[in-house]
């Protein structure tokens, strides 16, 4: 790929890291997700977050899949949450002192991958908005849980949350139609609800509460597979730990698509996997690193 053309298309460039720095300089991220049969989604998110440079990554999963998630994740610190065996091993909505201590220290909390659609997810999302001052990233089942909360939930958060729906979730979880265009629909929601709306799909749109937006041009049909959104959630959370949202959100979308383009070039759009996308993320980041 033409590095010059890629750098010219990037919304911003990644700064070089200071020689004298520590993991605490690059933020703490807590990912919350998973349920019985869905240990892969939060794991993909945590692996992507580690690759995207977060200083510390915590992964909170239901007790029902804790041992599986702990084996799968070497570089994220895995925490168990109370789970309900009668509800597909989903979280009950209760937290633990260990979880509370981690959440209180984190800059960003990303919730949703594989979380499941149960009452416990709704209770947990409600507590995330009330108890901690972290930046929230809401994806997948967290968007469903959001639809069950008060309409003013987003407006009451300390910082604007980042929502990452695909078109189906935008319609069915957020209750919006995509009209008259994707950018206009995304901007309308972001402004009305004081949030950052990332409408995924071809030409992903990132819209901000002030009405500004970014339309991404990287990515390919090979990203249209389960787990792709989970990887974006991890990348988004990691970059929000390191940069302000105005920089982190467009960069996350761009890098996710660029890593997908590199994966497609090496493996093909049919054969590439989400793990390939995560593995190509460091190369994508190198391509837009400041000289």
Image (tube, rainbow, N blue to C red):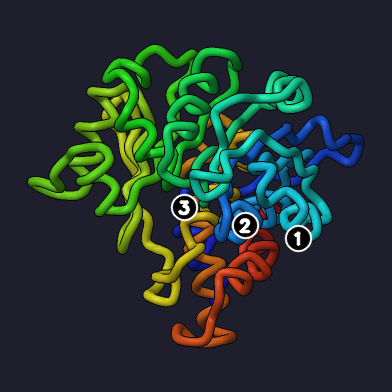
Label 1 Cα neighbours within 10 Å, binned few <14 / some 14-19 / many ≥20: some
**Label 2 to label 3, Cα distance in Å?**
24 Å
Contact flag, marks 2 and 1 (Cβ < 8 Å): yes
Q: Quadrant of the N terminus?
A: bottom right
**Label 2 to label 1, Cα distance in Å?**
9 Å
| Residue 144 visible in rendering | yes
Q: Which residue is mark 2?
A: 39
Label at residue 192: none
Label 3 Cα neighbours within 10 Å, binned few <14 / some 14-19 / many ≥20: many
Residue 33's x, y, as percent?
Answer: 57, 44
Q: Earlier in the sequence, mark 2 or mark 1?
A: 2
Which residue shows up at 59% across the image and 49% down it? 234
Residue 83's x, y, as percent?
Answer: 61, 38
Q: Nearer the viewer, mark 3 or mark 1?
A: 1
Asked whether, in this view, residue 29 is left or right of residue 210, the answer is right
Element class at badge 1: helix
Q: Which residue is mark 3?
A: 253
**Label 3 to label 1, Cα distance in Å?**
25 Å
Asked whether, in this view, residue 265 is left or right of residue 70, the answer is left
> Would you place residue 154 above or below residue 21 in this image?
above
Contact flag, marks 2 and 3 (Cβ < 8 Å): no
Q: Nearer the viewer, residue 112 or 47?
A: 112
């Amino acid at each position: 790929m033409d590095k010059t053309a890629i750098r010219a298309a990037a919304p911003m460039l990644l700064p070089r890291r200071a020689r004298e720095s520590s993991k605490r300089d690059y933020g703490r991220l807590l990912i919350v997700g998973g349920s019985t049969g869905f240990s892969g989604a939060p794991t993909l998110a945590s692996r992507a977050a580690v690759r995207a440079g977060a200083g510390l990554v915590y992964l909170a999963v239901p007790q029902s899949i804790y041992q599986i998630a702990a084996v799968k994740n070497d570089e994220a610190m895995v925490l168990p949450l109370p789970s309900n065996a009668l509800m597909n091993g989903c979280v009950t909505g209760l937290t633990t002192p260990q979880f509370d201590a981690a959440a209180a220290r984190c800059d960003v909390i990303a919730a949703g991958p594989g979380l499941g659609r149960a009452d416990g997810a709704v209770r947990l999302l409600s507590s995330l908005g009330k108890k901690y001052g972290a930046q929230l990233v809401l994806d997948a089942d967290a968007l469903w849980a959001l639809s069950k909360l008060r309409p003013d939930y987003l407006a009451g958060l300390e910082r604007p949350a980042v929502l990452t729906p695909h078109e189906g979730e935008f319609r069915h979880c957020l209750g919006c139609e995509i009209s008259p265009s994707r950018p206009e629909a995304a901007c309308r929601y972001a402004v009305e609800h004081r949030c950052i709306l990332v409408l995924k799909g071809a030409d992903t749109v990132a819209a901000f509460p002030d009405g500004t937006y970014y339309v991404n041009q990287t990515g390919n049909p090979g990203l249209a597979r389960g787990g792709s959104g989970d990887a974006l959630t991890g990348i988004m959370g990691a970059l929000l730990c390191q940069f302000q949202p105005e920089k982190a959100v467009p960069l996350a979308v761009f890098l996710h698509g660029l890593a997908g383009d590199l994966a497609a070039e090496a493996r093909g759009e049919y054969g590439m996997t989400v793990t390939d996308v995560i593995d190509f993320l460091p190369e994508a980041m190198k391509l837009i690193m400041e000289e």
